[in-house]
């Protein structure tokens, strides 16, 4: 990599959720792609395998943010994510002997599906290691795409645990490991998303893209598309996005090298890793202008909005590039904005959790531990005097204790408006309700909710 020296900057506007990694501007405008990336070769290898996914102008988002928003729809890829590109590009370059011995991968789901499809396409035996909590939809899809060419093994709680087991299996059986992100061939394959964007953009505008929003997991997409885009449009501001509960690239940027996080929130399964790739970081530190964290609750709200308003099914990682637009509303006014929708593998069984997280994030869902006086009518008074006309009890678990003056109850309340919360708390105090609100940061929240 050459063209810009990395020197991270922090401003008063930046916090733990955001880091500006762009350097002082240099007179040299040409950005040189790492010679290890063979993007043109990847385009040729993938031409007959992947779908050239559409670039779409989105009128609703453009109107909302007073700019021009374009969506790169990788959720419409054959395997419903961009991951096929990197997996097939790397496997296609293996020798006949390597292919004969078989291949192995570790994945939270999307890489597994791209890998499985590639195995079937190339007629190669593959073994897929996936975390035990992987959505069943992704496990089933992996088996469907690979058919008899793949075997799925569920091992470990996180991707990182799974990767350790997969690599050990690879060595033991003399097979070839196909990493999900940390390899130049994988990065080159993912970079073809950027090639398609550049090819299709003239259909919509002759002006350059001002802001490009890219989701980050291990960093394959952000490194590949980021490197290609900077070589073609050096003035585009490239923003890398991570879920708030898995800020591995942000941590790497701050440390100056990849670091392993102690723990992560696995909810955004397509973008939650403890440690970004070495190759990926080496590129991202030069091509990303900022790394920004997106709250999981905001991601959930965006998933629901995209489904209800656009009839677009996006997975949590795929929603990040749209979810973040609120945070950049002022900067993107009047600009050309491009959001990469990285995947659409969303398990319908997760929708209740997605709705719950959205409501909590939007301030519409609250949980309390309430100690009602043990007398007839105590609960009736709470409902009639404390709750507003639009407040709804969505959860109630009450344990009567005969030898106590009061008994605890877990109460979940859903409000119609965020502003109703203040009135609710005032009435609880007015009628001397003995309550404790369960904060999402409390340990008890994780056990009860």
Image (cartoon, helix red, strand yellow):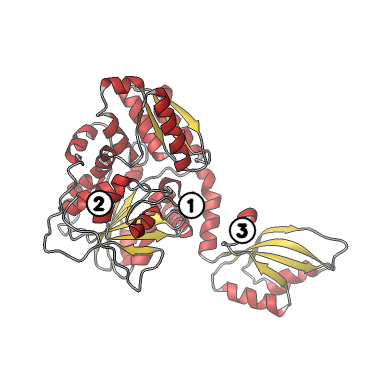
Q: Position of residue 123 (x, y in %)?
A: 33, 21
Among the 4 quarters of the image, the one containing residue 106: top left
Residue 311 or residue 251, whichever sits in front: 251
| Residue 22 in the figure: left or right of residue 381 | left
Q: Reading the chain from its start, which is encountered first: label 2 or label 3?
A: 2
- Foreground disc of the pair 3, 1: 1
Q: Where's residue 361, x and y in %?
A: 51, 62
Residue 311 seen in the figure: no
At label 2, counting other C-alpha atoms closer than 10 Å, the crowd grade (few under 14, some 14-19, many 20 or more) is many
For the residues labelled 2 and 3, the Cα–Cα distance comes to 38 Å
Q: Residue at x 43, y 49 (%)?
A: 274
How far separated are the C-alphas under marks 3 and 1? 17 Å
Indicate left or right for 230 with 246 as reference: left
Towards the viewer: 409 or 157: 157
Residue underneath mark 2: 226
Which picture quadrant has residue 408?
bottom right
- Judge whether residue 118 can be spotted in this image: yes
Q: Which mark is residue 373?
A: none
Mark 3 sits on what residue?
A: 443
Percent of width and height locating residue 6:
24, 59
Q: Earlier in the sequence, mark 2 or mark 1?
A: 2
Residue on which disc 1 sits: 262
Query: Where 247 falls versus 75 (above or below)?
Result: below
SS under mark 3: helix
Q: Circle 2 sits in a helix, a strand or a loop, which is it?
A: helix
Disc 2/disc 1 C-alpha distance (Å): 28 Å
Residue 38 image-quadrant placement: top left
Q: Is 189 rendered above or below residue 396?
A: above
* Extreme-bottom residue of the structure: 430
């Amino acid at each position: 990599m050459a063209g810009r020296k990395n020197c991270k900057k922090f401003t008063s506007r930046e916090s733990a959720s955001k880091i500006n990694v762009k350097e002082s501007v240099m007179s040299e405008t040409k950005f040189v792609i790492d010679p290890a990336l063979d993007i043109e070769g990847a385009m040729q290898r993938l031409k007959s395998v992947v779908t050239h996914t559409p670039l779409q102008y989105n009128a609703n988002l453009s109107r909302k943010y007073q700019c021009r928003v374009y969506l790169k729809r990788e959720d419409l890829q054959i395997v419903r994510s961009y991951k096929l590109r990197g997996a097939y590009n790397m496997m296609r370059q293996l020798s006949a002997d390597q292919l004969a011995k078989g291949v192995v991968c570790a994945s939270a789901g999307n890489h597994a599906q791209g890998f499985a499809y590639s195995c079937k396409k190339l007629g190669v035996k593959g073994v897929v290691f996936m975390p035990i909590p992987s959505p069943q939809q992704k496990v089933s899809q992996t088996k469907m795409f690979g058919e008899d060419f793949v075997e799925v093994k569920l091992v470990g709680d996180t991707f990182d645990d799974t990767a350790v087991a997969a690599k050990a299996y690879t060595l033991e059986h003399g097979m070839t490991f196909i990493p999900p992100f940390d390899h130049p061939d994988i990065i080159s394959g993912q970079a073809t998303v950027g090639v398609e964007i550049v090819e299709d953009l003239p259909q919509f505008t002759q002006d350059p893209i001002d802001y490009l929003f890219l989701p980050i997991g291990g960093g394959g997409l952000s490194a590949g598309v980021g490197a290609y885009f900077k070589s073609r449009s050096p003035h585009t501001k490239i923003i890398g996005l991570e879920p708030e509960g898995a800020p591995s690239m942000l941590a790497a940027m701050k440390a100056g090298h990849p670091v392993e996080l102690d723990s992560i929130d696995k909810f955004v399964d397509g973008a939650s890793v403890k440690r970004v790739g070495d190759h990926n970081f080496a590129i991202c530190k030069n091509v990303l202008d900022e790394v920004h964290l997106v709250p999981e609750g905001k991601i959930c709200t965006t998933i629901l909005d995209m489904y209800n308003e656009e009839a677009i099914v996006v997975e949590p990682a795929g929603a990040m590039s749209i979810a973040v637009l609120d945070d950049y509303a002022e900067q993107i006014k009047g600009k050309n904005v491009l959001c990469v929708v990285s995947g659409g593998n969303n398990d319908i069984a997760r929708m209740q959790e997605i709705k719950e997280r959205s409501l909590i994030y939007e301030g519409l869902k609250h949980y309390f531990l309430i100690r009602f006086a043990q007398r007839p009518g105590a609960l009736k008074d709470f409902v009639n005097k404390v709750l507003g006309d639009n407040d709804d009890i969505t959860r109630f678990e009450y344990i009567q204790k005969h030898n106590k003056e009061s008994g605890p109850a877990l109460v979940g309340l859903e409000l119609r408006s965020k502003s109703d919360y203040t009135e609710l708390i005032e009435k609880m105090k007015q009628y001397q309700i003995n309550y404790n609100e369960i904060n999402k940061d409390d340990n008890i929240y994780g056990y009860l909710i």
